[in-house]
Amino acid sequence: MDLDEIPQSSALKEAGDTEQAASAATAPVHSIHDSASDTHSTPQQGQDSCTQMQAESSGGWEDWQSGTYHLFECRFDLSTRENDNGIVKSYTTGEAFNSTVGQSRLQMGIRGDDQKMTNGRENNFFKALKWSPDGTCLLSSSNDNFLRIFALPDATTTTPEDTPLSAGCVIKEGEVVYDMCWYPGMNSADPATCCVLSSSRDHPIHLWDAYSGELRCSYTVTDHCDVNVAPTALCFNLDGSKIYCGSNNMIEIFDTTRPGRDSLKRPTVPTRKSRKGQKGVISCLAFNPDHSDLYAAGSYLKTIGLYDARADELLMLLRDRGSPFSSSTSNATKTTTTITTNNKETETGTRRQKTDMGGVTQLQFSHDGQYLYSASRQDSWIRCWDIRNTAQVLYRLERPGEVTNQRIGFDVSYDGRWLSTGDMNGDISVFDLSCPQDPQVERLKARIRGHDDVVSAAMFHPSGAILATCSGQRKYDLALDSSSSSGSDSSDSSDSEDDGEKMGNGVFKGLSGASKAVVNVVENSVRLWSLPGESVWYVNGQRWGESGMGATDTADPSPLAGSSDVDGTQKDSTPVGAAPVEAQDQGT
C-alpha cells in the first residue's frame, strides 16, 4: 500500500515533506531513538578483518549482514519468586488518574459535562493498552472516553523515580470507546503513518493523527435504517490497506484510502433466524501473521470463526463446551491449576471448576500462524487452539477472571515464547508457550503482584525487554452494599459491549478462596516493567555462541568484535524506556 494514500490531517498536508511535518506538530513521541525502536537491529559495517572474512566465506558480506540480528530473550526462574522472578518496576503514571470520570473531564477543561454524563461518578479506570508497532509509545483508552498516547521515556537521561509517565497526546472521543488499534505500518520517523483508529458508541469510526490528535477522516457504519452503528471490534489487515469492523452478525470492510460510507458488508449468518454461520456481536478480530489471508472473529455468543479474507467465507467455527476437571482434561491444565490454586481445596471439598468458554473478548495468533489464543469474559482460562490440524484446544492457561465481564488483555511476546496477562486479583502472570503439543510442560513461569486493582492489560514491548500494564475497574464513589451489588450484576448472556465491563460487585473471590475487598482501593495507572533476560545475536538463523558458531572459552555475546561492553552486554541492545541498568542486572 502506498503510504501517500493514507488520509492525512491538514496540518501534515501543509507541512509538505516529512521533516517539516515532524517539526510543526507536537509529537507525542519526542524522546525517540531509532536504534531502540527497531525490534531487529542490523549491525553496522566497520568490523574487524576476522569477522568480515568469516562473513565473506559464507556467501558474501551483504548476505551475512542481512541475516545477522539480535533479540532480547527473557529468562524467568521459578527459584527467584521472592524477587518477583526478576521483574523490576520501572516508570509509572502514579496516582495521576485516581479520580472519577467527572473529575478527569474537569481537569481536561470540559466544564459542565460532569453533571450530564451518566458515568460521571464512576471510577476513571484504564480499559486497554497497546504498544505502537515501532515500540516508541503506548496507546490507552480509559473510562472518561479519552485516548492517550504515552511516550516511552529515555532511560539514559531519566529515572523512574523522578520521571512519571505522562500523555503527550490526548484524543477526545464523543462516547464510550469500544475498540482502538494502531496503523500496522506506523513509524515515528514518518508522520504520515502515525495514526490510530477508534470506535465509540453511536459515532463513525475515527482515524486520528497520533502527533497532533487531529481527526484525519471517518468511516461510517450504518444499519438497514441508515442509523450510525459503532463497531465493537476494529482491525487493520496486515498491510493496512483494509479496515475490518465487527458488529451484530456482521463484518464490514473499508478501504483505508476511501473514507466515508463505501464498504463491503459481509453477514456472518445467512439470515437472522438461520442456525448456520456465526451468530452474535463480533467482539474481536485478529489476522494471521503468516500472510495466508486468514483471520479470526470472536463472538459474545461463545464462538470463534475462522474466515478466508480472499473468498470472504467462513471456514471453521470453534467452540469449547468445556468439562469439569477429570482424566480428560489436559495435564498442562492440571499442572497450572496445581501451581496457582492446588485445585482450590475448600471446606466443602474440592471444587471442580468447569472450563466452558464465555463470550470471547480477545484473539491473537501465534507468530508462526499455527495456533490461536483466545480469552473470554466470565472465564478463568486463556485457550490455545490448534487451527492447522485438530481445531481443538491444546491446553488452557489459568488466570482468575471468572466473575468479571471486564476485558482483561493478554499478549504474546515477539519471539512467540511467552504470554503475559493480568487478572482480576491484580497479579501479572507469564506463561511458557514452547512445545505446545507437549501436555507435560509446566506453563506458568512467573506470577507477581502488579497492581492493587484489576490488571486490565499486560503487553510486551516489541523488543521483548519491557512489559506494560494498566489497571482499574468500574467503581462508584458510593458505598456499595450486598443488596445494591446483587441487583447490578451483569449476566454472561448479555450481548452488549457497555454491559461487558460492569462489575456491580465490589468484592472479588479469587481462585485461592481468599476474598479480596477492592471496592475501597482505587488504582488507575499505567506501569512499565523491566524483564529479566539478555540480548542474543543470531547469525544465519543460529544463535551466536552455540557449538560451531563463535563458541569460545569466554564467549563473546556479539559476532562483531569490539561492539560489546566490558560486562558482555550490547551497547545498543537496551531499548529506550527500559529500567536503569542497575535494576536490570538485579533481574538477571
Image (spheres, helix red, strand yellow):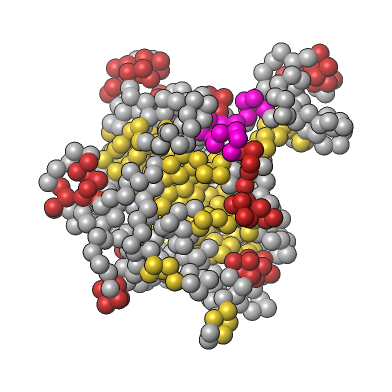
Number of labels in the image equals: 0
User: Camera-side residue: 275 or 9?
Assistant: 9
User: Camera-side residue: 508 or 541?
Assistant: 508
User: Camera-side residue: 217 or 579?
Assistant: 579
- State the image quarter where residue 10 is shown: top left
Percent across and percent down for residue 212 are 31, 28
Percent across and percent down for residue 58 are 83, 23
Q: Is residue 192 magenta?
A: no
The residue located at (53%, 76%) in the rendering is 354
The residue located at (41%, 25%) in the rendering is 30
State whether residue 413 appears in this view.
no
State whether residue 160 appears in this view.
yes
Percent across and percent down for residue 200 are 29, 48
The prevailing secondary structure element of the residues shown in magenta is: loop
Bounds of the magenta segment: 570-583
Percent across and percent down for residue 316 are 54, 61
Q: Quadrant of the C terminus?
A: top right
- Whether 233 is drawn above or below 360: the answer is above
Please state if 584 lies on the left or on the right of 148 as rendered: right
The residue located at (40%, 37%) in the rendering is 165
The residue located at (59%, 52%) in the rendering is 84
